[in-house]
Image: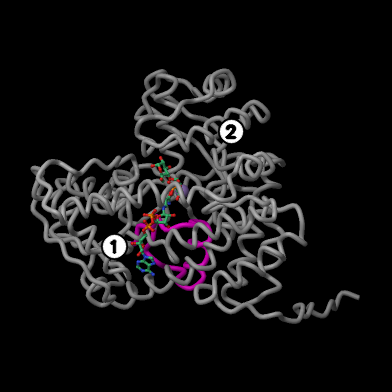
Amino acid sequence: MKTENLHITIAGGGSTYTPGIIMAVLNNIDRFPISSITLYDIDKERNDDMCLIINYMLQNNDLPDVKLTQTSDPETAFTDVDFVFSQIRVGGMEMREKDEKIPLKYGLVGQETCGLGGFAYGLRSIGGLLEIVGFIQKYSPQAWILNYTNPETLISEAVRRVYPNVKMLNACDMTISLEETIARNYGYNRENWIPKYYGLNHFGWYTSIYDKELERDVMPELIQKLKDTPMKVASFNSGDNSWQDAWDMLSKITTNFPDQIANNYLEYYLYSDDVVDHADPNYTRANQVMDGRLKHTKDVANLIRSGATDDVIDFDFGEHGQYIVDMATSILNDEHRRFMLIVPNYGAIPNLREDAVVEVPAYVGRLGAEPVAMRHHINDFHKGLMEAQNAAEKLLVDAFFEHSYSKALQAFTLNQTVNSAAKAKLVLDEMIIANKGYWPELKEDAAPVLEEDNRI
Ligand SMILES: NC(=O)c1ccc[n+]([C@@H]2O[C@H](COP(=O)([O-])OP(=O)(O)OC[C@H]3O[C@@H](n4cnc5c(N)ncnc54)[C@H](O)[C@@H]3O)[C@@H](O)[C@H]2O)c1
Ligand SMILES: O=P(O)(O)OC[C@H]1O[C@H](O[C@H]2[C@H](O)[C@@H](O)[C@@H](O)O[C@@H]2CO)[C@H](O)[C@@H](O)[C@@H]1O
Ligand SMILES: [Mn+2]
């Protein structure tokens, strides 16, 4: 593997996260000696805006000189690359808005990656990511793919069915973000923590958080703090207070289920009714992001385009960029750093089906991810929740590859935010219309013929 003059391509170069990722790349050039960066996007306007922003960053900061190019041509984008960071949003925020609003019409959770919004997103995203992974296998099969594209569990399951040996890490920044928020709210240093955790993506629980300086598992005391004093939004949480609802709900979850700290996304599954009651069906998170992060990114590009000279780069970079750069350097330099990754289970969670796609700690070196195996069974409560949700996710991926309406309906019905097969069908049928051109065509198909039961 090359260890200098590296070339990375960002698939979804126009993403609002690109400035943070590139800032992290440039701030770590000593460990990650990049010489060129290519932005690949199907939307030229988004790529143009981002190139303006990145070039402005390069010109107005004391940053290493790297060659920045942009393209919408896959061969140009993925030839002779060493790393691909992927963060696409198939259908854009416009489709995310439908993902969130259609389920809400029927009193069901409407969310980007959870619930039926997440399943609708998954049926769009899988095709987009498989196409990009196919390009990379064709033009740079030696490249490592570090993927942030959501929904992570569905993406990981689908890609591994087609490319079982793909060099790919699937990562989520929620756990580090949650840990950082907890640490800042209650006066700890996350850098001293070794968290143990298991789940599906956006559907998991901590089992311990060992603090190396205090020399103890601090999770029990954190549970008490979460119950007594709900967290406040930390400044780095992309600045917007939308996260306050998440932290309030995490305190509710911890109060009612105090044995482990849950990922804040569990609110969508455990308190679906509360989430629906709190939601504004006419103005969802997609609208907030369109009016916030997305608009701000466009505004910055236009300021630069109109000749701005003062420092207009004021993005909140968060943990997102540093995390994926740390993964890349851990591969490149065989550093064996520990990350929370979405990986095939294969016994990491011993009493969960081995072909599940799970989120667990993993050490990352030149060979990729080496997951940490748990040494005990998970409890029936979490096991039951995960088995049902994982089955729903597998059925959804089956529906994608088999173009199967009946499996899609089973998946929508089994999703753990859904309490009614009738509502699941109403949402599915409306989503089929809304996602025309994005989803594979789903066909009514005969119930699968059960294999002859030759035991009788
Ligand atoms: N894994 C995580 O924890 C995590 C954290 C944050 C964001 N994300 C994900 O990162 C992605 C980007 O988020 P965002 O808010 O920046 O979205 P965005 O809509 O702002 O940007 C996505 C970019 O992808 C481009 N795109 C869409 N389809 C494409 C395709 N087929 N090929 C190439 N480019 C394509 C769009 O044109 C756009 O420029 C989303 O999938 C989001 O869910 C994941
Ligand atoms: O609603 P969005 O688009 O703002 O965020 C959806 C994503 O939320 C999580 O990522 C968070 C991150 O955890 C938080 O610290 C901060 O940086 O915002 C990020 C995104 O805005 C989640 O992990 C992602 O999967 C979601 O896509
Ligand atoms: Mn995530």
Q: Position of residue 60 (x, y in %)?
A: 9, 45
| Quarter of the image that includes the C terminus | bottom right
| Dot 2 or dot 1, earlier in sequence | 1
Q: Position of residue 224 (x, y in %)?
A: 57, 19
Type of the residue with mark 2? Met
Task: Specify whether 383 is left or right of 192.
Answer: right
Q: In what element is the residue under mark 1? A: helix
Residue under numbered circle 2: 249
Q: Position of residue 76 (x, y in %)?
A: 22, 75
Name which residue lies at 38% across and 58% down.
Answer: 147
| Quarter of the image that includes the N terminus | bottom left
Task: Specify whether 118 is left or right of 194.
Answer: right
Q: Position of residue 337 (x, y in %)?
A: 34, 43
Residue under numbered circle 1: 46
Question: On residue 133, which mark appears?
Answer: none
Is 148 inside the magenta-drawn segment? yes
The span shown in magenta is: 145-168
Name which residue lies at 67% across and 70% down.
Answer: 429
Name which residue lies at 36% across and 39% down.
Answer: 238
Q: In what element is the residue under mark 2? A: helix
Q: Are marks 2 and 1 in contact (CB under 8 Å)?
A: no
Quadrant containing ligand 1:
bottom left
Real-space Cα separation, disc 2 to disc 1, in angstroms: 35 Å
> Is label 1 within 8 A of ligand 1 (CB to nearest ligand atom)?
yes
Most foreground residue, 220 or 142: 220
